[in-house]
Amino acid sequence: MLSYILKRLALTLPTLSLVSIAVFLLIRLIPGDPALVLLGEGADAAALAGLRADLGLDRPLPLQFVSWLQHALRGDLGRSIVSGEPVAGLILQRFGLTAVVVLIAVTAATVIAAIAGLLAAWRRNSVIDLAVVGTATVVLAIPSFWLGLLLLLLFGLKLGWLPFVGYIPFSESALQAMLFLVLPVVTLTITESGVLTRMMRSSSIDVLHLDYVTHARAKGLPERTVLVRHVFPNAFAPTLTLVGLTLGHLLGGIAVIETVFTLPGLGRLMVDSVLARDYPVVQGCLLFTAFVYVLVNLVVDLCYPFFDPRVTAR
Amino acid sequence: MRGRAGHVGTGRIGLRHIGLSALIGIPLIGALLLTIGIGLFWMPYDPIAIDLAHPLGAPALRHWFGTDQFGRDVLSRSMLGARISVLIALATVVVAITVGTALGLLAGYLRGWTDRLLMMITDAVLAFPGILLALALIAVLGSSDGSIILALSTAYTPSVVRVVRATVLSIREREFIEASRSAGDSSLQTISRHILPNVLPPVVVLATSLFGWAMLSESALSFLGVGVPPPAPTWGNMLSESRPYMDIAGWLSIVPGLCIAGTLLGVNLLGDALRDWLDPRRQT
Amino acid sequence: MARSAHLAHVLGTLAVSGALALGCVCSQAVTAGTMLRARFKSDIVSTNPGTRRDENTDAVLLHVVEGLVASREDGSPAPMLASRWTVSADGRVYTFTLRPDVVFHNGAPLTAAEVIWSLQRYLKPETRWRCFAEFGEHGIAQVLSITAPDPHTVVIALDRAAPMFLTTLMRADCGGTGILHPDSVDADGQWRAPIGTGPFEMGEWRHNQFIELNRFARYSPLPGARDGNAGGKHALVDHVRFLIIPDSSAARAALIRGSLDVLDNLAASELTGIRGRPDLRLERVPILDCYALLIQTHDPLLSDVRLRKAIALTIDTAGLTKAITWGTGTADNSPIPVASPFYGSVEAPLRQPNLAQARRLLSAAGYDGQAIQLTTSRRDPQMFDAAVVIQAMAAQAGIHLDIDTVDWPAHLSRYTVGTYQLMMQSFSARLDPTLSFGIFIGDKREEPRKVWDTPHSRELLKRTMTSADPAVRQVVFDELTRNFVDEVPAVALFSSSRLSAVRSNVTGYRNWSAAQQRLWGVGLN
C-alpha cells in the first residue's frame, strides 16, 4: 500500500514540473510590471529599476526559475511582491477558509445526492423520480455566481436575515463568522448537488438491475437492508470519483463564489495575484493546487475499493 | 471550471423522460434560435447606443427589460448578447472537439511514447485551475472574442482527448480492427473507416455538454472582468456590470441570469435526449 | 475494517479537521476602548512612508508620521513639527525652528538629530523615497547640507532657490517627508515599523483584513482647528480600524447595518441607496483630481492636431461629467482642478461640442474611418464608464474607436511606456497646479508617459516653479491652459468630488480636497 502511494506520487512529478515551468513562463508573458504597480503612476525610472532589483526581477529568467525551484523544494515559496508576506503562510491561511466552505458544501451535496439519487432510482419513473431529475437538471443550468447573487439579494438585502459583508475573522465572533459562510456554502451545495444527484441515480439504476440484488431480494431480505447494504456502496463508487474530481476543480472554480461573497479564499487569491502580477503567489498557488488535485485523486482512488469490491488497488 | 474532467455519462433517462426532455428542451432552444434570428435583422434599440438622460429605467412599455446605467436597452443587449455568447460557446466547442479528437485518436491508436507524452501534457493542463489558465491566456493575448475562444478551448481540449483516447483504447483490440490491419489497410484507413465512426457517439454527447460548460465559463470570466470587452454585451458581462446596481436596479441582474439558465436548461435537456437516442443500449 | 465503520471513520476525520480549521482561525480577545471603523477598498502596501505606496497607504501613514511642514486645505505650507521657518534672501537656505514639546511614539523627544537622520535617510537611494528624484539632477534643487546649530534648529542649504521646496516636502505621496525615530529601522537599516510623532501610533496590520491605529496619549496638538494635514489634530477615539472591504455593495451594507462607521469614497451611483436614511449622513467635497483622455501625439494618425481637435469636439464634457459622476463631479477642460485656488476665468469655459466642425476637421485631416484604439481599465469605474461614453459620442461624428480594456498592471505599463493611441486615465489629487500640469508636460524621450512634449510648454512649466508669487504664477497657468486647449495633447474632462457617508453618531468627519481620509478630529457619540 505504502509503496503504491509513493509510486503514484512519484509519477506525478513530471506533471508537476511541467506545470511549474508553464505557469512561470505564462505569468511573465502577461504585459505589466509588478514593480510599477507597487510604485504607482509617476514613479521615476531609477526607483523602478531599484525595486525590480530588490525583487530579483532583473535576473535572467532561467536563473529566477532555478532559484525559485530550489527554495520551493525546501518549502520556502518566497514572499508576495504586493504584501511582503511569506507565500506559504498566505496560501495555507486562504486555503483554510476555502477548504472549510468547499468541504462542508461538497459533503452536504454528496449526502443530498446519495439519498435523492438512490431514492429516484429505486422509485424509477415515478413522481419522485421526475421531481429529483427535474430539479437536478434545472440546478445544473443555473450559473453558480448568479445563484449566489440572487441569494445575496434576497437574504442579505431584502430580508436582511444574513450579513452582507464578506468576512469577519473568527477571532471577532465565531457565530458571526459562521453566518457569513452560510450563503456561500448553501450556494455551492445547491450548485454541486445537481450533477452528483444525476450520477448517483444513474449508477443506482445500473446496480439495481444486477443479479446479486435480485438474489438478495429473493432471499427475503428487507428492502431497506438491500438498499443500504448492497445497492448503495456499489452505486456510490462512481459518484465518489466525481466528488474527487469536483473537489479538484473547485479549488480554482471557487474564485467566482468568493468574488460574489467577498470571501478571502484561495480562489480569489489566485485571481487577484494574476491581476496584480504577484509572481511568487501565482506560482505558489499553482503548485499547491496541482498538488492538492493529485492528492485528492489519490485519496479517492484509495477509497474506491471500499465501495466497489470488484476493483482492487493495484 | 465545470466539466474539465470530461464527465459525460451522468444522464441516463428513460423513454418517458426523453419525451419530456425534448418537450421542454426544444421550445427553449427554439426560443433562443428565434431570438438570435430576429436579432440579426432587427432589435428594438441599438444595443450600444447610450442615452444618458434615462439611466437605470425600470422595465416598462418603452423598454420591456428596462435600461442599464448608460440608458442602453436591456432587451436589445440581451438579444445581441445571445448571438455573441452562443457564437463564442459554439466556436469553443468546434475547436476543442476538432483538436481533442485528433490528439485523442493519435494517443489511443499509436500508444507508446506519443501516448505518454500527450497524456502528460493533458494531465498538466488539467492540473491547472481552469479559471487561472483562461485568465492568464486572455491577459497575454488581450481581451477579444478570439482570445476567449482560444483560452476556453485550451481548458476543455484535454477532456475531449481523454474521452476519445479511452474510446479508442476500448475498441482497438476488437476483431474487426485486427481484420482490417491484416487485410492490409493503412493506419489512416483503419482509423477513418472503423475507429472514427465508433468514436463519434460519445464525442457528440460530449459536445452538447461542452457547449453548456463553455457558455457557463464565458459568463464566469466576464463576471470576473476578463470577458468580452465593452461595449459588446454578453450575458456574462451584463451580469458583471449589474453588481453595483443590484439593490436599485434588480432587473439588470435577473434578466441575463435567466437567459443563461434558460439556454443551459434547453441545451442540457436536448443533450440528454440526444444521448439516449444515440445509445439505445442504455434505455430500459 | 467494516465498510460502515470505515465511512464513519472518514466522516469523523473530516469533522475533526473542519473543527480544527475553524479553531485555528480563532485567536485574540476584542480590543477595549472606543473604536472608529473606516474602510479601504484594498490593502495598504507597506508601513514605510513615501516608499512603496498607494493612496490608502499614504492616508494611513499620515496619521502616524508628521513632517516639518504640512499642507493646508488651500495647498499652502503650514507649521507642523517646525513651529516656524525663515528663508534666506537668495532663497537657498531654509532655517526651521522645531517645536519643543513633541515626543515620538516610543517616548523619545523630537530633536534636530532625528530630523537630520530622517531627511538623510530619505535622500539615500536605497530608501527609494518617491521624492528622491526631485532632489537629483533633474529636480527642483539639490541638497547641499543639513545641519543643526542647536538641538531645536535645522538648517537646510540648497544649491539654488526652489520655491517648490516646501510644497515638495508636504507631498502625501512622499509620506509628507515624515520625521521618523531611528528605531523605525533595525541595525542593518531594514524597515521595522513607523515610529513617528502623529496623533495615532501603528497598531496591528492584519493583511487583507484590517489596519488598526491606536491613539497616542502623549500627542501634543497644535492650537487651532483642523486644516488639511495641518492645524490641531486631536485623536477623539482610542482605536481606528481601517477594514479592507473590496466590494462596494458589501461596504454599503456594512455601513447600513452598523458594522462600519465611516465609508469614504462612495461611487456616485451608490448615492441613491444611501440618501434619505435617517441613520446616515452624506458628505461631499470637491477634490483636486483630474480625469483626462490622453492622446499619443507620436502616433501617425493622431499626430495631426486636426484629428485630435475633432475628437475633442465630439465630447459633450458637461453631459459626460453629469452622467458618469451622477452630478457630483464638475466638468473641467483644464488640467487645473476646479477646487484649486488657481482655477479662474480662463480655466472655467468648457469646449462646446460641435459635430459639424468635427466632421470638417476630419475630412481636412483625411480621416477615413480607421479604427483608433482607446485603452481603459476596470479598476476605476468612472475611468471605464468615461471610455464607453466617449466611444459612443465620437461615433456620432464618424470616428471609430475600439475600446481595449486591460487590467491595471497592463494599463499602467502602457501608460508609462506610451504604447497606446488614446487612453482614459485618472490622476489622483495634486495640491498644486504645477504638479497638475506636470502630469502632462515633459520630454517623451526621457519620460514616455508625458503627453505634452513641446519645448514651449516645458519652458512655461519651469516658470511656474521659479516664482512664489501667486499672481505671477496665475498668469503662466492661464497661458498653459489656453495652449492646452488649443494643442489638444490630451482632453481634460472633469474633476470629481469625494463622497462619504457616515453613521449619524459620528462627529467631525470631513474629507478634503486632497481626497485623503483623516480620522483625527472624528469622534463617536
Image (spheres, helix red, strand yellow):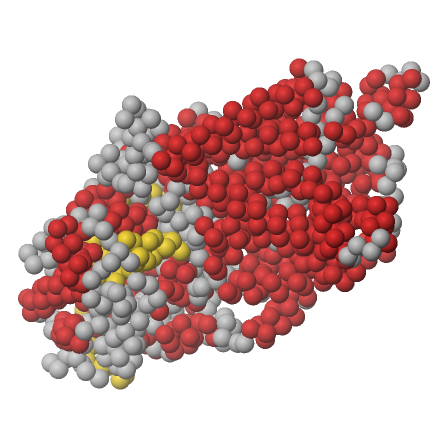
Tell which of C326 and A141 is nearer to you.
Answer: A141
Residue C113 visible (yes or no): no
Residue beneath the point at 71% across and 52% down: B105
Quarter of the figure with the C terminus of chain C: top left
**Figure check: B45 above or below C59:** above
In the visual, does C443 lie left or right of A62? left
Residue beneath the point at 24% across and 38% down: B51
Tell which of B221 and A272 is nearer to you.
Answer: B221
User: x, y (%) of residue C507?
Assistant: 27, 41
Residue beneath the point at 60% across and 70% down: A65
**Figure check: C171 above or below B64:** below
In the visual, does C437 lie left or right of B210? left
Question: Which residue is the extreme one toward the right?
Answer: A219
**Figure check: C259 above or below B121:** above
Residue beneath the point at 47% across and 53% down: B146
Q: Quadrant of residue B272?
A: top right
Tell which of A43 and A229 is nearer to you.
Answer: A229
Tell which of A137 and C408 is nearer to you.
Answer: A137
Q: Quadrant of residue C227?
A: bottom left
User: x, y (%) of residue C368?
Assistant: 24, 58
Residue C307 visible (yes or no): yes
User: x, y (%) of residue A281?
Assistant: 55, 59
Quarter of the figure with the N terminus of chain C: top right
User: x, y (%) of residue A157?
Assistant: 42, 29
> How many numbered callouts?
0
